[in-house]
Image (spheres, rainbow, N blue to C red):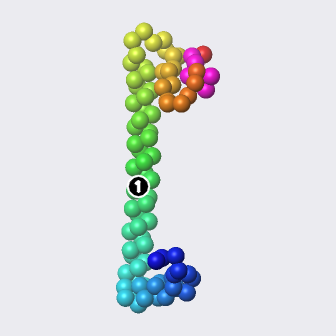
């Protein structure tokens, strides 16, 4: 059904939306969409930083771990030659 819209159809839809909502409403809506995307990216970055921090803290708190020891990589599909060996 949507395979046959083409460029003229998309332009017609854009003009109808512009007439119905007006330029000011569309620009404010796009601003809110941009803020939402920015907040989403910030949330993803914060959560990945939190996971990395928890991983470092867990490594530090391992019993018998020396100050330079790293945690073993337990990522599925990795082999010891891909960086999970201790130096």
- Left or right of 46? Residue 11 is right
Most extreme residue toward the front is 1
- Residue plotted at (58% across, 21% down): 80
The image quadrant where one finds the C terminus is: top right
Which residue sits furthest right?
Answer: 81
Q: Main secondary structure of the magenta part?
A: loop
Q: Name the quadrant containing residue 61.
A: top left
How many numbered marks appear? 1
- Tell me if residue 63 comes above or below residue 59 in the rendering: above
Q: Quadrant of residue 24?
A: bottom left
- Note whether residue 18 is visible: no
In the foreground, 2 or 41:
2
Please rate how many residues cluster around mark 1, counting C-alpha atoms within 10 Å: few if below 14, some from 14 to 19, many from 20: few
Judge by depth and name the residue closer to the eye, 32 or 13. Answer: 13
State left or right for residue 85 relative to residue 1: right
User: Percent position (x, y) of residue 7?
Assistant: 57, 82
User: For the magenta stretch, what is the residue range?
Assistant: 81-86
Tell me where residue 26 appears, x and y as whole percent: 41, 79
The residue drawn where x is 46% and y is 85% is 13
Name the residue rendered at 42%, 48% in the picture: 44
**Residue 67 spot, x, y in % from top left:** 49, 15
Q: Is residue 84 magenta?
A: yes
Residue ranking furthest to the top: 64
- Disc 1 marks which residue? 40
Q: Is residue 18 magenta?
A: no
- Is residue 41 at least partly visible in the picture? yes
Please tell me whether residue 36 is drawn above or below residue 52 in the rendered image. below
Q: Secondary structure at mark 1?
A: helix
């Amino acid at each position: 059904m949507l395979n046959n819209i083409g460029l003229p159809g998309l332009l017609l839809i854009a003009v109808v939306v512009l007439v119905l909502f007006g330029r000011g409403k569309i620009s404010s809506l796009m601003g809110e969409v941009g803020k939402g995307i920015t907040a989403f990216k910030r949330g993803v970055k914060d959560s990945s930083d939190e996971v990395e921090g928890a991983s470092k803290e867990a490594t530090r708190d391992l019993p018998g771990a020396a100050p330079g020891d790293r945690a073993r990589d337990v990522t599925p599909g990795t082999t010891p030659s891909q960086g999970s060996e201790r130096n």
